Image: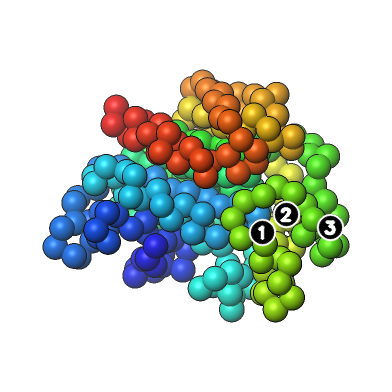
Amino acid sequence: MTTMTSGTGRWLRQGVRPGGGAVGGGDGGGVRPRGRLVCFPHAGGTATLYQGWGRLLPPELEQLSVQYPGRQDRFAEPCVEAMEELADRAAEALAALPALPTVIFGHSMGALVAYEVARRLEQGQGASPVVRLFASAAPAPGIERDSLPSLDDDALIAYACGQGGPSVDAYGEPELRPLLMPSLRADFRLLTEYRPDGPATPLRAPITALGGDRDAGCTPADLSTWSDLTTAGCDLRVFPGGHFYLHDCEAELVGLVTACLSR
């Protein structure tokens, strides 16, 4: 996964394609993109959650992942603890890109950030039309979540490990914990304090809500709450697995995105 070299580079990571090239890249084999997939990671997560997705897309589709501050190559930057600021800054980075039909995918906390960014893009921040929002493993904004832990470090680690997902074993390493906890703590503070300003605004784009059939923290009933946040229809897709079901379903998920951008 490579960092983009424009002014958007702090926020966006470009997916690597088969052979190491990138859509529209300067490697001599670049293909002019005709669509874009933008992915948002979970609480405590990083852009590398989606590092394999670019290899599964057809060559004419661009794949970008959002890198939140305070982790990996943005470790020296302060974490963002307010949804409004995080969504504003991510939307600004996307609005600076050339206009392309765009699908937005967010997992867990990333689904809420993705919705807020899609809302900003639809309200005129940038020229890229939002084709569809994929909201994964999270209830819609404004729905009370009883399962969030306290902000105590031990409670956060226990919760993150219970969810599974990439790199959770690292929380058990004493030398790594100080590097990982600030971003995890900031993200859960953001989730705890996030409240949409008034009634959540429905998108003009359709929504697909996705989850795992063994995810106790986000049931199909929770996923169905996204239907109130679009005027264009909401699909519900449930896959085998828990909260991080998407690791075993990457090809199918990327296929859904490709179908949206191929119509």
Instruction: Give the Cα distance between marks 1 and 2.
Output: 6 Å
Mark 3 is on which residue type? Answer: Ala
Front-most of residues 135 and 93: 135
Per the image, the residue denoted by label 2 is 161
Residue 20 pos. (x, y %): 27, 61
Q: Amino acid at mark 2?
A: Cys
Q: Which residue is mark 1?
A: 168
The quadrant in which the C terminus is found is top left
Do tag 1 and tag 2 residues touch (Cβ < 8 Å)?
A: yes
Q: CA distance from mark 3 to mark 2?
A: 10 Å
* Residue identifier under label 3: 155
Residue reaching furthest to the left: 28
Indicate which disc, 3 or 2, sits on the residue closer to the N terminus. 3
| Crowd class of label 1 (few under 14; some 14 to 19; many from 20; radius 10 Å) | some
Q: Is residue 112 visible?
A: no
Residue 122 location (% of width, % of height): 47, 39
42 on left or right of 92: right
- Residue plotted at (61% across, 35% down): 241
- Nearest the eye: 16 or 124: 16
Percent position of residue 249, x then y: 48, 37
Quadrant of res 51: bottom left
